[in-house]
Image: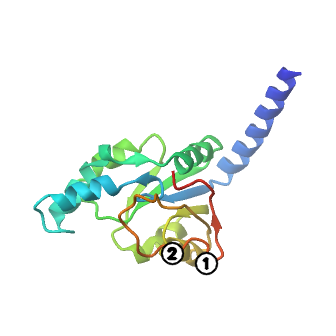
């Protein structure tokens, strides 16, 4: 009986994997406060004597990924979707200043890591592939996903997040992923 259940589960997985890979379907995750809790890397950059949002500031943020921690539910969901055959894209709303180590850190999960300096142009990235899901934390993320005609899911920010603007979960009638703030 257990063997039959395992074989049935593998058959279902095989069917899903086949359909997803044949269709070349993709999912995308926003990076900061969606896939990872990134406040510690930003705090490190703000504590330095560098001009906020300068090239050196972004270099510190992008190279401090070891201080960031993956959020449990979104990270597990990203891996589950990857196992089901989806190509995973991570979109970071930051400039690509010394970003290659960060890309390298996420190479096992993400087939594509995009630095998108302008928050308002994420929809252009989402229009470039067969994206079926987009996970984001901010109101603008949800609106960008909708503009690209991709089903958008809200990920809750951590209560410890330093970024409080552009965040009103549920007000856009989007699906809010439960327990995603941890």
Q: CA distance from mark 1 to mark 2?
A: 8 Å
In this picture, residue 7 sits left or right of residue 130: right
Q: How is the image coloured?
A: rainbow
Seen at 28% across and 64% down, the residue is 95
- Figure check: 69 above or below 30: above
User: Taking the image as drawn, is residue 106 in sight?
Assistant: yes
Q: Secondary structure at mark 2?
A: helix
Name the one closer to the observer, 81 or 2: 2
Toward which corner of the image does residue 142 lie, by quadrant? bottom right
Name the residue that disc number 1 marks. Answer: 172
Whether residue 130 is visible to the viewer of this picture, yes or no, is no
Q: Where is residue 54 shown, x and y percent of the image?
A: 17, 68
Residue 15 in picture, x, y percent from top left: 77, 42
- Whether tag 1 and tag 2 are in contact, CB under 8 A, the answer is yes
Position in image of residue 96 (x %, y %) = 28, 60
Q: Residue furthest front?
A: 159
Name the residue carrying label 2: 139
Task: Residue at 23% x, 61% y: name it.
Answer: 58
> Could you say whether the residue bearing mark 1 is in a helix, strand or loop?
loop
The residue depicted at 54 percent of the width and 77 percent of the height is 143
Q: Residues within 10 Å of mark 2 (few under 14, many from 20)?
A: some
Across the whole image, how many numbered discs are drawn on residues? 2
Quarter occupied by residue 116: bottom left
């Amino acid at each position: 009986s257990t063997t039959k259940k395992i074989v049935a589960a593998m058959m279902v997985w095989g069917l899903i994997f086949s359909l997803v890979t044949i269709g070349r379907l993709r999912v995308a995750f926003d990076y900061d406060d969606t896939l990872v809790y990134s406040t510690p890397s930003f705090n490190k950059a703000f504590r330095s004597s560098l001009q906020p949002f300068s090239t050196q500031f972004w270099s510190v943020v992008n190279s401090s990924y070891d201080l960031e921690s993956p959020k449990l539910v979104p990270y597990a969901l990203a891996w589950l979707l990857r196992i089901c055959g989806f190509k995973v894209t991570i979109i970071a709303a930051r400039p690509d200043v010394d970003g290659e180590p960060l890309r390298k850190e996420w190479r096992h999960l993400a087939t594509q890591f995009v630095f998108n300096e302008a928050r308002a142009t994420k929809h252009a990235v989402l229009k470039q592939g067969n994206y079926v899901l987009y996970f984001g934390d901010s109101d603008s993320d949800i609106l960008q996903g909708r503009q690209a005609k991709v089903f958008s899911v809200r990920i809750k920010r951590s209560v410890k997040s330093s970024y409080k603007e552009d965040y009103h979960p549920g007000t856009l009638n989007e699906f809010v992923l439960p327990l995603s703030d941890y």
